[in-house]
């Protein structure tokens, strides 16, 4: 989290070493890596057998769609993959038709720049996820500079569509084996993040960064679970209960058991039975003399698992039956709000496109200028300069700089790798296809560590694809790629600096207002004794989403140049107040005891964040 001290500096220091530092690989790095190999291999090998490997670039366009939506539930993944394939076909169709109508390089670069801007804006607005617009821009930009006739366009589009359909099947293939795999992973990440925050809070540290990461992970888990709007299954309801336990840990980290949260996370990641959570209002006090676990309920009464307990009215009830009935009622109350949230329609696309106008303008201007400069330097096919510029644009200038540095380093190392691999790839068509498959796997396996490391494999992959219609001199390819990389990175970054996002500060102000209103609404609902569980859950979800959006908006604005100082102190105070209100809503739902009912309870509302 940002410091509470405002930062009036208009130009931030640009990172160098930090931008190239390697991180931990993704938990599921092997899934996109294996998927793209499975999607690319059959069409390429079939064309090789038919002696038409020159058509492989078109099937490759469809096969690369297998890289998308690996974090989505399978019902949602089916829709996302279908939309990505349609988007790829639309961009490819525009590129192929343009290439068949004109060979004017300036016109083609202009078309490619406009396509890149549209692809960037739509992918960001729909939050399609990695690799976002980069693959779509690569496909359409490369197709612009391949000689075409109008009569060839339908056949080439049919090849791309067939490979896209195969990629869709590859992406959906794990569904019968692990139908809830993505939801399980998202839930496990939320539990682990909550455990990390609980450990930080117990250590007496500030824990603001861990708290923000934990809230973001929990919010991401809810987005994954709510992505499917049909009636949830028993498994998904159990996962929703676990995410609620992560929220309870965020509300009262001093009372959370990090070991139990991590144990649940490990169990969820597998294919076994999802662990059943107990009542978070009961705290274990220690073993009963008879060997049973003695628990203290939210009302302070003692409950002994070995025998019956006495209610206020004096009736004796079997404790196992009481606990079972109570858990059913509690889970019903918890999840009724989730059902209400699932019924809420998502925001329309047009309302999400407005804030992306500066990024779209940057993309169009940067890609066009990069292509024009590359043409002026004598390039015949300046699509790589265009793609390089398109890949740079992130949420702000600081992140754009980091991506530019990563792209340059990765591409320069990648051309050296291509120079080493090219002699092997030219042993024959099979060797060429195998090298392409190896580069596909390596790119997806490494890109999670850092973008530049993945680019080391992406660069030879792109160069090998240009070898499919016929071999070209290695020196010519390497020289052209180096020049286009430098041109695209330099011109693209200059365009990012020139087209500043002056509305970033206003978006932070709007996000602050949204959080304040959501907090006031949640506080009113929590204070109203007649509030229904659905209303309380909807208010809590709205506040949690507003807090996550505020942090993302503030972080994006903090990396932007040429703007007034951001209200960092107000952002921090708003987050603190919102987190206290979120804790109050969790307590109001009965998932935490009221302050003072247990000896270990710490009043989160009064705690320092």
Image: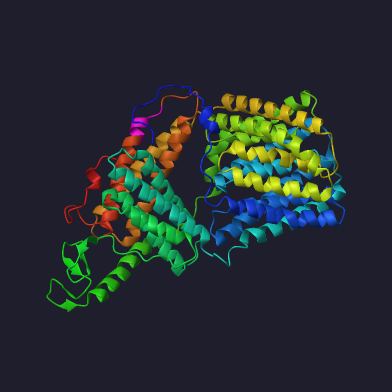
Q: Quadrant of the C terminus?
A: top left
The majority secondary structure of the magenta stretch comes to helix
Residue sitting at x 71%, y 36%: 417
**Image coords of residue 306 (percent x, y):** 21, 74
Q: Nearer the viewer, residue 186 or 10?
A: 186
In magenta, the rendered stretch is: 566-571
Residue sitting at x 60%, y 32%: 406
Q: Is residue 466 above or below residue 174?
A: above
* Residue 501 appearing in the image: no
Q: Nearer the viewer, residue 223 or 177?
A: 177
Tell me: 534 left or right of 413.
left
Q: Is residue 40 above or below residue 119?
A: below
Q: Nearer the viewer, residue 477 or 553?
A: 477
Q: Is residue 348 above or below residue 296?
A: above
**Image coords of residue 139 (percent x, y):** 72, 44
**Image coords of residue 216 (percent x, y):** 42, 46
């Amino acid at each position: 989290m940002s410091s509470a001290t405002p930062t009036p500096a208009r130009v931030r220091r640009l990172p160098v070493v930090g931008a190239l530092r390697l991180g931990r690989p993704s938990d599921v790095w092997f899934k996109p890596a294996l998927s793209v190999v499975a999607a690319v291999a059959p069409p390429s090998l079939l064309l090789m057998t038919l002696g038409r490997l020159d058509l492989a670039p078109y099937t490759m366009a469809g096969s690369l769609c297998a890289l998308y939506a690996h974090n989505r539930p399978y019902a949602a993944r089916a829709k996302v993959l279908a939309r990505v394939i349609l988007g790829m076909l639309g961009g490819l169709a525009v590129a192929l038709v343009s290439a068949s109508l004109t060979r004017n390089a300036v016109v083609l670069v202009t078309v490619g720049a406009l396509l890149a801007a549209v692809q960037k804006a739509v992918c960001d607005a729909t939050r399609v996820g990695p690799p976002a617009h980069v693959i779509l821009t690569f496909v359409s930009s490369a197709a612009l500079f391949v000689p075409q006739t109008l009569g060839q366009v339908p056949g080439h589009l049919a090849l791309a569509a067939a490979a896209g359909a195969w990629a869709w099947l590859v992406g959906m293939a794990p569904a019968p084996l692990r139908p809830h795999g993505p939801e399980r992973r998202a839930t496990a990440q939320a539990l682990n993040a909550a455990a990390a925050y609980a450990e930080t809070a117990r250590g007496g540290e500030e824990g603001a960064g861990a708290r923000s990461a934990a809230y973001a992970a929990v919010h991401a888990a809810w987005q994954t679970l709510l992505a499917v709007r049909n009636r949830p299954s028993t498994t998904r309801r159990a996962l929703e209960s676990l995410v609620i336990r992560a929220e309870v840990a965020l509300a009262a980290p001093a009372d959370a058991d990090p070991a139990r949260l991590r144990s649940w996370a490990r169990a969820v990641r597998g294919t076994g039975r999802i662990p059943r959570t107990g009542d978070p209002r009961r705290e274990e006090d220690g073993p009963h003399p008879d060997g049973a676990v003695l628990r203290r309920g939210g009302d302070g009464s003692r409950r002994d698992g070995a025998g019956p307990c006495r209610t206020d009215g004096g009736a004796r009830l079997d404790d196992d039956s009481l606990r079972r009935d109570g858990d059913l009622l509690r889970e019903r109350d918890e999840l009724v709000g989730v059902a209400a949230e699932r019924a809420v329609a998502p925001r329309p696309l047009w309302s999400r496109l407005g804030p992306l106008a500066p990024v779209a303008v940057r993309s169009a201007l940067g890609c066009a200028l990069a292509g024009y400069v590359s043409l002026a330097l004598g390039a015949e096919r300046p699509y790589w300069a265009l793609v390089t510029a398109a890949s740079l644009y992130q949420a702000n200038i600081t992140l754009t700089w980091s991506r530019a540095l990563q792209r340059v380093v990765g591409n320069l190392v990648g051309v050296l790798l291509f120079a080493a691999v090219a002699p092997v790839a030219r042993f024959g068509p099979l060797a060429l296809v195998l090298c392409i498959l190896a580069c596909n796997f390596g790119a997806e396996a490494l890109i999670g560590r850092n973008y530049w490391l993945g680019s080391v494999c992406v660069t030879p992959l792109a160069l090998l694809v240009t070898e499919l219609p016929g071999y070209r001199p290695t020196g010519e390819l390497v020289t052209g790629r180096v020049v286009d990389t430098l041109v695209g990175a330099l011109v693209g970054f200059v365009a990012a600096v020139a087209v500043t996002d002056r509305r970033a500060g206003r978006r932070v102000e709007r996000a602050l207002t949204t959080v304040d209103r959501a907090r006031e609404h949640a506080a009113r609902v929590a204070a109203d004794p007649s509030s229904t569980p659905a209303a309380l859950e909807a208010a809590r979800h709205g506040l949690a989403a507003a807090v996550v959006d505020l942090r993302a908006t503030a972080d994006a604005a903090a990396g932007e140049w040429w703007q007034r100082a951001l209200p960092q102190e107000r952002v921090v105070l708003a987050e603190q107040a919102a987190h206290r209100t979120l804790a109050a809503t969790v307590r109001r739902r009965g998932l935490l005891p009221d302050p003072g009912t247990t000896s270990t309870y710490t009043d989160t509302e009064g705690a320092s964040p």
